[in-house]
Image (cartoon, rainbow, N blue to C red):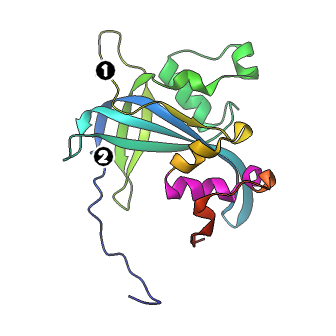
Amino acid sequence: MGRYTQETGSAFEHAPVGTHVARCYSIVDIGTQHSSHLGKPTTRNQIVVFFELAETLMEDGKPFIVTKFYTNSLNEKSNLYGDLIAWRGKEFTDDELKRFDLEKILGATCLLTIVHNDKGRAVIAAIMGLPKNMQCPPPVNEKFTFWLDAFDQDKFEKLSNGMKNLVMQSDEYKNLGNVKSDFDDEVVPF
């Protein structure tokens, strides 16, 4: 296609609209990201939380995967704060607010409400805990975390190219200095 490109469609399957039994299986720290909102620069420390839809399978028999980007903050106005309260079904204690271990959500089950945005992509509209008598099938994906403050080259190499690109844009990755990935040699679009 050369210099010009166009949207050509994709065989990528998007999770269906509705409420689904899900499990958190991965958290990726993508660090401090710079962008803009309404023409003003923004700086946010972000994480990406990955869920498998335990009972909603793709054509290949694997569970759909959905993600949600969060600012890594428990400020009462943050999306992470609101979603964790809805998921846990209780408020945070003062001690939890001082230092909540995000790895506590790994393996935790929930109900996710999925909607499609104006581009047809599946997005998480709501999260809540499972009702007491509802069960979640066993996990398919292994638990996985990646933390920039405990950088692990082997884990970094396991990230998708898209996640690697986001991590490499972070202030924390740039400050690591001597870390080199095979991915560094690839041309990555802005």
Task: Identify the residue at horizontal 71%, vertical 49% (top origin).
Answer: 44
Residue 146's place in the image compared with 159, above or below, is above
Mark drawn on residue 136: 1
Element class at badge 2: loop
Q: Which residue is tagged 2?
A: 15
Name the amino acid, label 2: Ala
Task: Identify the residue at horizontal 58%, vertical 62% (top origin).
Answer: 183
Could you tell whether 116 is left or right of 144 in the image?
Answer: left
Q: How crowded is the residue under tag 1: few (<14 C-alpha within 10 Å), some, or many (20+)?
A: some
**In the foreground, 145 or 122:** 145
Asked if residue 170 lies in the magenta stretch, the reply is yes
Q: Position of residue 57 (x, y in %)?
A: 23, 39
First to last magenta residue range: 160-173
First in sequence: mark 1 or mark 2? 2
Name the amino acid, label 1: Cys
Could you tell whether 21 is left or right of 74 in the image?
Answer: left
Q: Position of residue 7 (x, y in %)?
A: 36, 75
Residue 33's place in the image compared with 129, above or below, is below
**In the foreground, 116 or 63:** 63
Q: How crowded is the residue under tag 2: few (<14 C-alpha within 10 Å), some, or many (20+)?
A: many
Task: Identify the residue at horizontal 61%, vertical 27% (top origin).
Answer: 102
Image quarter of the N terminus: bottom left
Asked if residue 79 lies in the magenta stretch, the reply is no
Task: Identify the residue at horizontal 81%, vertical 53% (top origin).
Answer: 175
Q: Quadrant of residue 81?
A: top right
**In the foreground, 150 or 69:** 150
